[in-house]
Image (cartoon, grey):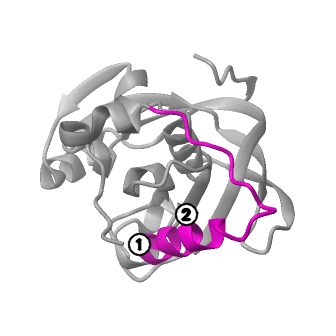
């Protein structure tokens, strides 16, 4: 199967669809999971990847790197897979100028929760519950939006178009910002 990365330029309607829940009682999902994992681990530019971005509209996320201080390290691969993830609790408030390979050079200032609690199934079908704080919560919340057909440009407080080198310079003066660590966060805004 040839993997074609979906972008807003060519696949906006596709990216806007809500991904289907994975049927864990049927081993067919393992093929899709392997494709997601192989692609996610092969692209060192990625922080994370929702399977819909590579043509698999299923509720699966691959997490590659979430350490804000090591984003340029191409060797990092956390290799975390989340199947049917659900945010059960969110609090706090952060702001970050997010980008996304699917949205090309569009960079948006996005508000996300500082802390999220997620229930999901791992590759072995084991149910997990995990709490993510700070930048990891931002990365995962971004991918969760993809599963619901929401792009970061849909939520942007402000939107800029900027190439990668310019974005890196811009972020030096506009870093990840923690506004609050414990206020209730409305995921539906």
Q: Secondary structure at mark 1?
A: helix
Q: Is residue 180 visible?
A: no
Q: Which mark is residue 39?
A: 1
Region in magenta: 17-40
Point out residue 128 in the picture as x, y percentages from the top left corner. Answer: 84, 60
Which image quadrant: the C terminus? top right
Point out residue 166 in the picture as x, y percentages from the top left corner. Answer: 14, 48
- Answer with left or right where residue 82 lies relative to residue 95: right
Which image quadrant: the N terminus? bottom left
For this rendering, which residue is in front, 61 or 19?
A: 19
Q: Going 54% across and 67% down the picture, which residue do you hit?
A: 32
Q: Badge 2 is on which residue?
A: 62
Point out residue 187 in the picture as x, y percentages from the top left corner. Answer: 65, 24
For this rendering, which residue is in front, 134 or 147?
A: 147
Which of the marked residues, 1 or 2, is nearer the chain's N terminus? 1
Q: Going 54% across and 34% down the picture, which residue do you hit?
A: 18
- Answer with left or right where residue 33 lies relative to residue 169: right
Q: Secondary structure at mark 2?
A: strand
Residue 154 sits above or below residue 114 on the image: above
Q: Is residue 129 visible?
A: yes
Quadrant assignment, res 10: top left
Q: Are marks 1 and 2 in contact (CB under 8 Å)?
A: yes
Q: Going 74% across and 42% down the picture, which residue do you hit?
A: 86
Magenta-span inclusion, residue 141 = no
């Amino acid at each position: 199967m040839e993997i074609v990365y979906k972008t807003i330029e060519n696949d906006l309607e596709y990216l806007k669809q809500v991904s289907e829940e994975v049927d864990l009682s049927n081993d067919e999902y393992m093929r899709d999971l392997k494709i997601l994992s192989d692609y996610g681990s092969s692209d060192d530019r990625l922080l994370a990847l929702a399977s819909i971005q590579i043509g698999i509209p299923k509720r699966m996320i691959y997490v590659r790197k979430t350490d804000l201080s090591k984003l340029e390290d191409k060797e990092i691969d956390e290799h975390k897979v989340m199947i049917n993830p659900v945010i059960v609790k969110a609090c706090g408030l952060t702001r970050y100028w997010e980008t996304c390979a699917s949205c090309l050079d569009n960079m948006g200032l996005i508000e996300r929760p500082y802390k999220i609690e997620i229930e999901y199934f791992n590759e072995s079908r084991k149910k997990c519950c995990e709490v993510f704080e700070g930048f990891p919560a931002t990365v995962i919340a971004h991918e969760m939006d993809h599963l619901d057909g929401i792009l970061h440009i849909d939520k942007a407080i402000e939107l800029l178009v900027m190439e990668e080198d310019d974005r890196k310079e811009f972020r030096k003066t506009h870093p990840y910002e923690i506004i609050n660590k414990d206020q209730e966060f409305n995921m539906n805004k």
